[in-house]
Image (cartoon, rainbow, N blue to C red):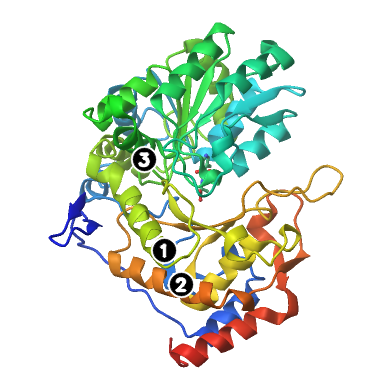
Amino acid sequence: MNITLSNGKVIPMEMHKVRIVQAIHLVPAARRLQAMEEAGYNTFLLRTKDILLDMLTDSGTNAMSDNQLAAMMVADDAYAGSESFYKLADAVQEILGFAYTIPVHQGRAAEHLLAKAFVKPGDVVLMNYHFTTTRAHFELAGATVLEIFTDEALNTQSTHPFRGNLDVLKLEDAIQKYGADKIPFVRMEATTNLVGGQPFSLENLRAVKKIAAAHHIPLVFDGSLISENAYFIKQREAAYADRSIREILAEMMELVDIFYMSARKSTSVRGGMIATNRKDYYDRILPWLPVYEGFATYGGMSIKEIEAMAVGLREMTDVNVAGISPEFIQYFVGRLQENGVPAVTPPGGLACHVDAKRFLTHIPQSEYPAGALAAAIYIASGIRSMERGTISTDRDANGNEVYADLELARIAIPRRVYTLSHIEYAVDRLTWLYQHRDLVKGLKFIEEPKVLRFFFGKLQPLENWGAELARAFEADFGPEC
Ligand code: F0G
């Protein structure tokens, strides 16, 4: 909940108290440099013992509630027919309004099953923006992914409230061009991860549905950050200011033919699901479930997490749960802006995104500015962020580099995990880094996997800049920090 202090300053206040904690440690800059070198300048390959604030992702790392943990203790661990599954199905019906629920072990498993059931070679899958695993699954099924975002989507210094909107004119054009029979579905991602956690409006979702329905094309909704997208609709779309998150969710879901989510984010558990009201779609997907995931009542998830997911689905409709990360991100972005550090605006969900193209103007995309920035942030602070730029975009079939639309260092805000002092520390070290940005140079691959190379790829700093940066840091802060 945003609270206005007596001096007019607005701060996000946590509407929860902390009752279980995990100790964290700050290893000195010299060790951070060594750890970064061991990790091949890839923050995915760091070990958490070397990390102070793990802001890699909010996926599976949000703090769970007392009620979620309590629910895990009463899980009905059966291979088939588990009552825990029926509790989840009831919650899905109550909150999202779908009659059929298919649990899967995480979001990309849902994408895999959707690709198996709906996507064939030569298809074109339309979407407001791709996510890495989404594109990989649909392309592996032989389809092309076509993103039809608005011009505003790629403006990192925008004031537009809904940069995640799909461009409806481009949607009409694409349907004319490819024909409805080549388009298995239109996918809307809430919120658009790689564009900086930017939401779409309910007005846009309604317009997309109208066009898709006119051509009998199903609307698929990736709800990985659904509660955050609903929170932004409440904040930024005038018609919904007085509506509850639950009401907004219900109105969104009325437009959706197939829903899926990584439950690791909005519901704060480790799992995922697909849900629909169409029996024919359910029957198409279900046969693949035991092949790749597990039986229909657990789908590869731990039953304990299924119990917690049922609770998490209801809890995410609380405005203080849906809004806490967006409010922290808004504060974080505002503080960086005060210090002149180029953060992406407007603040979105998931993370504070720093614009590497504006931060490191001297590094060309061929030398991966966002990857260099994520590595530099770690060396200067012990904070683990994630590259979301060209390294996260694989080469094309001919081996050519495909330059990403945006070069972002993503500093995720897992829900309810960190406090304002952590954010202030991050702001301070990022500001120091910005003042020393000339020390940071590019990266080059030394080990480059073909698919999803950002996970396991290893890189090297050009001109050994990591050591230079660590030395400058030590000179300012001493050997202990
Ligand atoms: N769709 C979106 C929009 C996502 O953000 C993610 C995951 C997935 C699908 C895949 O779900 O990880 O459960 O298999 N995003 C994570 C992240 C990995 O860090 O942003 P998953």
Q: CA distance from mark 1 to mark 3?
A: 22 Å
Image point (56%, 87%), residue name: 472
| On screen, residue 465 above or below 45 | below
Instruction: Mark 1 and mark 3 in contact? Answer it, CB < 8 Å.
Output: no
The label number, if any, that marks residue 431 in the structure image: 2
Image quarter (top left, top right, bottom left or bottom right) of the C terminus: bottom left
Q: Residues within 10 Å of mark 2 (few under 14, many from 20)?
A: many
| Pointer 2 residue Cβ closer than 8 Å to ligand 1 | no
Mark with earlier residue (1, 3): 3
In the image: residue 444, left or right of residue 117: right
Residue type, mark 3 in image: Glu
Question: Regarding mark 2 in the picture, which secondary structure is present there?
Answer: helix
Q: Is residue 150 or residue 258 the one in the foreground?
A: 150
Indicate which disc residue 349 carries. none
Give the answer, above or below, for where 108 lies relative to 1: above
Q: Mark 1 and 2 residues: CB-CB less than 8 Å, in contact?
A: yes
Mark 3 — residue? 228
Single out the residue that lies furthest toward the left. Answer: 6
Front residue of this view, candidates 340 and 10: 340
Q: Find out if the beta carbon at label 3 lies less than 8 Å from the nearest ligand 1 atom.
A: no
Residue 247 as seen in the image, left or right of residue 121: left
Mark 2 belongs to which amino acid? Thr
- Tag of residue 336: 1
Label 3 vs label 2, nearer the camera: 2
Label total for image: 3
Q: Earlier in the sequence, mark 1 or mark 2?
A: 1
Regarding residue 57, the answer to whether it shows in the image is no
| C-alpha separation, residue under disc 1 versus residue under disc 2 | 7 Å
What percent of the width, then of the height, locates residue 389?
A: 63, 53
